Image: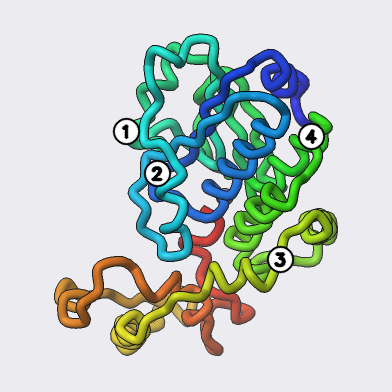
Amino acid sequence: MTIPKTILDQFHQHQRFYILGHMEPDGDALGSQVGLTLALRDWGKEAVPVSPGPFVRKEILHYQEIMASAVPLGKLESALLVILDCSTQERLGDLAPIVEGAVSVIIDHHANGEEYGTHRWIDPSYPATTLMIQDLLEALEIPLTPEVARELFFGFATDTGFYRHLDQGASTHIRRSADLVKAGADPKSAFRAMNGGRTLAGLQLLSRIMGRAVLLHEGKILYSLEEQNDRRDLGLESRGYGPPLSALSVRGGCGTGGAPQAGVGQ
Ligand SMILES: [Mn+2]
């Protein structure tokens, strides 16, 4: 953990924070945003989580009501913009223009991002942005409450596919996740939040998609498609089946049986 001192100074120096994340938010973006927001409030600061949405993924729909959708421009002056899990300015969607002229801190674990913002802490060795927030809170000596721990664990769990995408080098990360459980996170509830709420129609959609799957290039690529009529036929509006990556892990393809990586750790 090497958090640039300039980043820590920004948190000490500001009183008002807007906590932003990428568009089409996932558990890591939202868990980081809400976890940091709650922790900053505990620390005596003003913090508002802001998301450009849209809220598509089933496991995060409940976040929509607690996220603001815009930053009031009159209040931007003297505030710090904290942008989490967002590798490019463009991924902020409608919120992207407010970065110009504001003081911002970018905290992200994507390796392939672009340089934007005022102060940057980018570290691809982290499997989730929530773990960076956990280290940040420790460096700022802000204690982990059960609420904050639950948010951070949720992001960690979604970005690691509930530990599935971690390898032998991950012992430190796993130990850090144990600290979250000790502070009040509940793995069983997080797993249920990630995977619960499936409908029969959602599974039938997945069944259609799997029925069309084809292996190419000696098993290195598995592709399938969803047809335009599928959702309408089944009366589905949102993506009710969850990311089918684990379902796409097959013998005879994809190297050691791991799922194709598209969409993992976004
Ligand atoms: Mn992430």
Mark 4 element type: loop
Residue bearing the label numbered 1? 94
Residue bearing the label numbered 3? 186
CB atoms of marks 3 and 4 within 8 Å: no
Q: Residue at horizontal 77%, vertical 20%?
A: 5
Instruction: Give the label on residue 121, or none.
Output: none
Nearer mark to the viewer, of 2 and 4 = 4
The colour scheme of the drawn protein is: rainbow
Relative to 245, 120 lies left or right: right
Q: Amino acid at mark 1?
A: Asp
- Which is nearer the N-term, disc 2 or disc 3? 2
Residue bearing the label numbered 4? 142
CB atoms of marks 2 and 1 within 8 Å: yes
Mark 3 element type: loop
Gap between marks 1 and 3 measured at Cα:
34 Å
Gap between marks 2 and 3 measured at Cα:
27 Å
Quarter location, residue 243: bottom left
Gap between marks 2 and 4 measured at Cα:
28 Å
Question: Quadrant location of the N terminus?
Answer: top right
Q: Residues within 10 Å of mark 2 (few under 14, many from 20)?
A: some
- Disc 1 under 8 Å from ligand 1? The reply is no
Q: Residue at horizontal 37%, vertical 81%?
A: 199
Nearer mark to the viewer, of 1 and 4 = 4
- Which is nearer the N-term, disc 2 or disc 1? 2
Q: Residues within 10 Å of mark 1 (few under 14, many from 20)?
A: some
Q: Amino acid at mark 2?
A: Met
Q: Residues within 10 Å of mark 4 (few under 14, many from 20)?
A: some
Percent of width and height locating residue 75: 44, 15
